[in-house]
Image: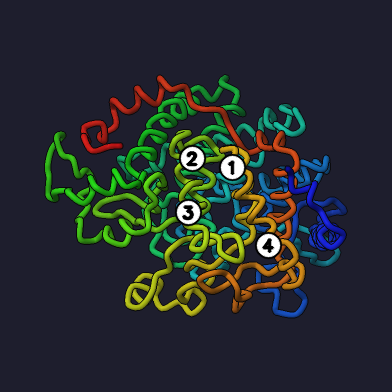
Amino acid sequence: MHVNELETTENLKEVEEAWRTLEKSILYYQGRPVGTVAAYDASVEALNYDQCFVRDFVSSALIFLIKGRTDIVRNFLEETLKLQPKERALDAYKPGRGLIPASFKVVSDNGQEYLEADFGEHAIARVTPVDSCLWWIILLRAYVVATKDFSLAYQPEFQNGIRLIMEICLANRFDMYPTLLVPDGACMIDRRMGIYGHPLELQVLFYTALRASRELLICQGNSDIVAAIDNRLPLLCAHIRQHYWIDINRLNAIYRFKSEEYGKGAINLFNIYVDSVPYYELDKWLPKKGGYLAGNVGPSQLDTRFFSLGNLMAIISDLATEEQSQAIMTLIEDRWDDLVGDMPMKICFPALEHEEYRIVTGCDPKNIPWSYHNAGSWPVLMWMLAAAAVKTNRTSLAQKAIETAQGRLSTDEWPEYYDGKKGRLIGKQARKYQTWTITGFLLAKELMANPTYLPLISFGKLPAEQVSRACEFEIASVDPYMS
């Protein structure tokens, strides 16, 4: 039974309120709708919440595409592409060529309107947005799937825009892994939370953007980029599936790791020191049939926190195998109180606490344990949970999550996030009428009511022989403990 069959009059009123508030959030430029503001909360200082954030707009854009309001999405794609730097810049304080801004706002000056982009130079701690260019490509592909209008993506300006983003990701690198090396705070978690290096969220978005680019790029004139994507995709896929995966079998392997190994025959490839892994806690927490993708893997680093966006998008994008996808959903079901609780769902789990919180976050007062990015609950993740549930045929989990949030979000005035171990407290500094909270709720309901919308953000499996061939080149193939 779908969610729409369970609607009550009260629930319908909540949906109508959500749509009314979403309409108020639409941002206009030169008379055209070009996006949605982050929050429509007049009770507090706007800061940059009156701007349109690329990552925030994705859920708005998907709901607009579903409802046939494709002009807003097309305008957004066109205007943000114009903001992309096209020239090489050696100035340390200028954004690199190919970046898409984190956000933009409409500025009026002497009767003239223009868009002002923020590439992180105005953000708290001057955070660089790595995820915005990846989300931009993913959204462009969703627009093409929804409208069947390949002509937009085939325009020279769009082909060049995709190419420039791919050049940043594929060419300019100091790394030897197929993953993307990034600074801390470069994605949805945009403050210091110890996710620098190769965080799962950005690797999954990178993979999804590679898949989207491969569909959208015309080979003529882009043969080098297409060849690079074809090379990187199976390597990245194999790398994430092998090195990031944690289940009870993998935990047993890690528990018996030796360190300081050298050469091609090394088993502990990243030199993980066993005492740095909370294996006794994981032994109690991991269900027998459950598993998940680790938050980060790198030199002497295995971040065993569960990060929701990365794991859910790995399912949606087909980066995770079918077995891994089912195991992730089993983990969510078996650890429902920890990961979902009373407000879907935790951005990560568990929280950094005590001395670890002070060292890793820099004593960030907004990221105290069980708040904001430090294991706070984010309603926007509902749409990803719903999409993953549809993908794995585990729709009862998404239905339960929506029913948990239904009614409360409206009463609480659609807050940005919730605090507390079970998500019972409205976030201490959360904005009200947060647009992606509203659209996350609406999109979750739409995906449950009509699963045929899933291809907007989902893909088919990579050919098995490609991934298998990549495994032969992956240094992990020597690991006899892989489950």
Q: Which mark is residue 45?
A: none
Label 3 sits on residue: 334
Residue 393 position within the rendered picture, expressed as x and y whole percent measured from the top left: 60, 38
Tag 2 residue:
326
Residue contact at pointers 3 and 1, CB within 8 angstroms:
no
Q: Are marks 1 and 2 in contact (CB under 8 Å)?
A: yes
Q: Residue at x 61, y 77 (%)?
A: 429
Label 4 vs label 3: CA separation? 19 Å
Quick one: label 4 or label 1, which is nearer the N terminus? 1
Density class for disc 1 (Cα within 10 Å; few <14, some 14-19, many ≥20) is: some
Q: Residues within 10 Å of mark 4 (few under 14, many from 20)?
A: some
**Circle 3 residues within 10 Å: few <14, some 14–19, many ≥20:** some
Q: Check disc 1 and report the residue beneath it.
A: 394
Q: Could you tell me how far apart the alpha carbons at marks 4 and 2 are, in whole angstroms? A: 24 Å
**How much space separates mark 3 and mark 1, taking CA atoms?**
13 Å
Separation (CA) of disc 2 from disc 3: 12 Å
First in residue order: circle 1 vs circle 2: 2
- At label 3, the amino acid type is Asp
The Cα–Cα distance between marks 4 and 1, rounded to whole angstroms, is: 18 Å
Taking the spot 69% from the left edge, 63% from the top edge, the residue there is 38
